[in-house]
C-alpha cells in the first residue's frame, strides 16, 4: 500500500511539471493563474499522499492550510487585477 | 490483496488518470476558457479521488475526518477559483477562441 501511495505522489509531481509548462508559456495572465492553481491543487494531493504513505497524520493539517491558501491566491489575483468598482 | 488495498489502488490510479487528463487539456486546448474547463472539472475529480484514497488509509477517527474535510474543501474551492479566473479573463477583454472565418 505504501508503494501505491508513493507512486501516485510521484505521478502527481510529474503532472505538475507538465502544468508548469503552461504557467511559463502563458500567453495571457489568466492562463498562468489557472496553471499555478492546478500545480497548487496537485501539491495538496502530494502532501496528503505522503502523509498517508509515511504515517504522518500531522501533515494533513499542512495540506488543509495549503488548499485554503491556494484558493485565496486564485480568487485574490482574479479580483484585484480587474477594476470593478470595489473589492468584489 | 485485501479489499481495502484494492480500493486504495483503484482510487489512486483513477486520481492519477484524471490529473493526467487535466494536464493534457491544459497544454493542448486553444484558449483560456477551454483550459479552465479542463482545469476545473478533470482536476477536481482527480484530486477528490486521490484524497478519497488517503481517507481510506488512516484508521484513526480524527484523521479520517480531516481527510474528508480536505475532500469537501477541494470540491468547493477548485471550481469556484476556476470560475473567478474565467470571469476576470472576460472582464479583461479576452475573446473566446473560434475557427478562422467563423465569427
Image (cartoon, coloured by chain):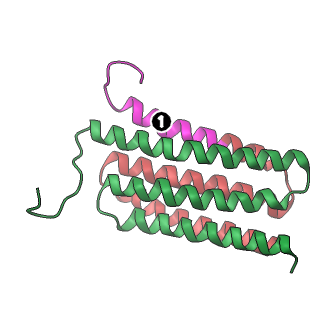
Chain colours: A red, B green
In this rendered view, identify the residue nearer to me: A59 or B47. B47
Indicate the quadrant containing the N terminus of chain A: top left, top right, bottom left or bottom right.
bottom right
Q: Is residue A75 left or right of residue A70?
A: left
Residue at 35% x, 57% y: name it: B34
Instruction: Please identify the dominant SS of the magenta region.
Output: helix
Q: Which residues are magenta?
A: A66-88
Q: Is residue A81 magenta?
A: yes
| Chain under numbered label 1 | A
Q: Is residue B27 left or right of residue B30?
A: right
Residue at 31% x, 42% y: name it: B89
Q: Is residue B65 left or right of residue B101?
A: right
Q: Residue furthest bottom?
A: B1
Q: Is residue A46 left or right of residue B25?
A: right
Image position, residue A55 (x, y; %): 87, 59
Residue at 24% x, 52% y: name it: B96
Indicate the quadrant containing the C terminus of chain A: top left, top right, bottom left or bottom right.
top left
Look at mark 1 in the image and give the residue it sits on.
A75
Q: Is residue A53 magenta?
A: no
Image position, residue B46 (x, y; %): 59, 62
Q: Secondary structure at mark 1?
A: helix
**As drawn, B29 above or below B40:** below
Q: Residue furthest front?
A: B3
Image position, residue A62 (x, y; %): 73, 44
Residue at 88% x, 76% y: name it: B2
Amino acid at each position: 500500500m505504501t508503494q501505491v501511495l508513493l507512486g501516485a505522489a510521484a505521478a502527481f509531481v510529474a503532472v505538475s511539471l507538465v502544468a508548469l509548462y503552461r504557467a511559463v508559456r502563458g500567453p495571457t495572465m489568466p492562463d498562468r493563474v489557472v496553471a499555478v492553481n492546478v500545480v497548487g491543487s496537485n501539491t495538496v494531493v502530494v502532501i496528503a499522499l505522503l502523509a498517508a504513505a509515511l504515517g504522518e497524520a500531522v501533515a494533513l493539517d499542512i495540506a488543509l492550510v495549503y488548499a485554503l491558501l491556494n484558493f485565496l491566491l486564485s480568487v485574490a489575483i482574479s479580483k484585484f487585477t480587474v477594476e470593478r468598482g470595489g473589492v468584489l | 490483496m485485501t479489499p481495502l488495498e484494492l480500493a486504495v489502488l483503484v482510487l489512486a490510479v483513477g486520481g492519477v488518470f484524471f490529473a493526467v487528463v487535466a494536464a493534457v487539456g491544459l497544454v493542448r486546448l486553444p484558449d483560456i476558457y477551454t483550459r479552465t474547463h479542463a482545469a476545473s472539472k478533470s482536476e477536481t475529480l482527480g484530486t477528490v479521488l486521490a484524497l478519497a484514497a488517503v481517507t481510506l488509509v488512516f484508521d484513526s477517527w480524527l484523521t479520517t475526518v480531516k481527510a474528508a474535510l480536505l475532500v469537501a474543501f477541494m470540491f468547493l474551492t477548485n471550481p469556484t477559483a476556476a470560475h473567478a479566473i474565467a470571469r476576470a479573463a472576460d472582464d479583461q477583454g479576452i475573446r473566446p477562441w473560434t475557427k478562422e472565418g467563423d465569427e
